[in-house]
Amino acid sequence: MRVEDPKVVAALPELGVQLRANACLAELTSLGIGGTTDLLRITRHEAIPELLRLLDSHGVPHKFLGGGSNLLVRDGELPWVVLQLVSPQPDVVLDGNLAHVDAAADLGRTVTYCAKNDLGGMEGLIGVPGTVGGALRMNAGAYGMQIGTYVREVKLYRTAGRHLETLRGDHISFEYRHTSFAPDDMMLAVTLELPSKPYKEILQGIRICNEKRRSSQPLGQKSAGCIFKNPPGASAGRMIDELGLKSLRMGDAQVSDRHANFFVNAGRATAQDMLALIANVRERVAKAFDVILEYEVVVWNG
Ligand code: EPU
């Protein structure tokens, strides 16, 4: 979708919004899949309510993009524009055990920066791609930890109420790959409270998690991490593997030969290829195990 109305185009610089015309979502997502649309890059949180009023009043539909690492975007010309936060510098500010982090900050760099300042707890998240905001929205976790545990405060834009809001961590529910945020809430910043730990000790934990991840996940390939959530008490990857579906391919979308819950773009996969593969695997798991796997990946197919 093109932002063409001259009134909208003229208002964007005043709001600190950079317009990148005809952006390719395949280049902005870790799966390397997705069509094209105009990208609006937001440099000031405070301008968001006015920006969204402007877009709504001119009938410009929009979606919020984080780091694009858990996302499958449809092909072709997209019927909405995409909004993305530009990370300020610095994007992490420490104050004792508190880390004030911009939602657009890279998750891995945040974990490392905190570690170097003797703040631990998030070792398991090393190697998880994406932004802190994206991790927060889905309560990303690995190796026995989840980011929600450390959240003390979140600043967000509430699309429903059209206002900026700050929520206390204990007013947010963080469950397995699920939070109480509304799907259209936009994460802006978070304050984490992290336990003190010597850097050397944190580094050891990071090395162990990195090694485990390297040995079981297809890190060098284009993927969105795990496609499905694990059903209670079971592993989606193991179930898919047990059905002999590793390497199953539809077009250039393929079940990883390393971890069966990772579906990779093995060439020039389209969203259609990937959606067909996901549906196929889901159906086979349902037949064999009587379990309907729930998507972990977010799909922008509308
Ligand atoms: N397994 C197989 N075959 C496979 C994959 C896994 O037999 O192809 C078996 C493993 O051998 C192991 C069990 O299944 O016995 C669990 O596997 P793994 O330790 O890889 O964990 P997982 O449940 O598949 C979860 C998260 C990952 C996270 C790892 C490590 C979900 C959906 N996945 O995977 O998170 O990195 O644990 O903590 O919760 C993600 O969410 O995108 C993600 C990658």
Image (tube, helix red, strand yellow):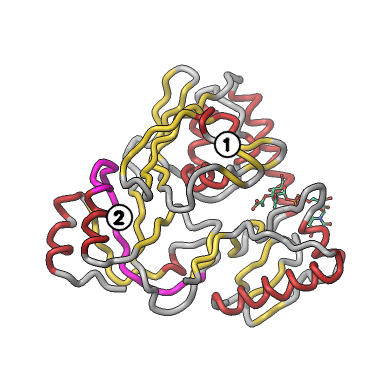
Question: Residue under circle 2?
Answer: 41
Question: Residue under circle 1?
Answer: 173
Q: In which quadrant of the rendered view does residue 276 lie? A: bottom right
* Residue 64 position in % (x across, y down): 40, 56
Residue at the extreme front: 161
Callout 2 crowding tier (Cα within 10 Å): few <14, some 14–19, many ≥20:
some
Instruction: Answer left or right for 258 relative to 184.
Output: right
Q: Residue at x 62, y 64 (%)?
A: 221
Residue at the extreme bottom: 251
* Residue 144 position in % (x across, y down): 72, 36
Q: Secondary structure at mark 2?
A: strand
Towards the viewer: 114 or 59: 59
Residue type at mark 2 is Arg
Q: Residue at x 20, y 49 (%)?
A: 16
Q: Residue at x 57, y 77 (%)?
A: 269
Towards the viewer: 120 or 158: 158
Please determine whether, in this image, residue 84 is positioned above or below residue 36.
above
Q: Where does the magenta region start and end?
A: 33-49
Judge: label 2 CB < 8 Å from ligand 1.
no
Q: Secondary structure at mark 1?
A: loop
Instruction: Answer left or right for 199 relative to 234.
Output: left
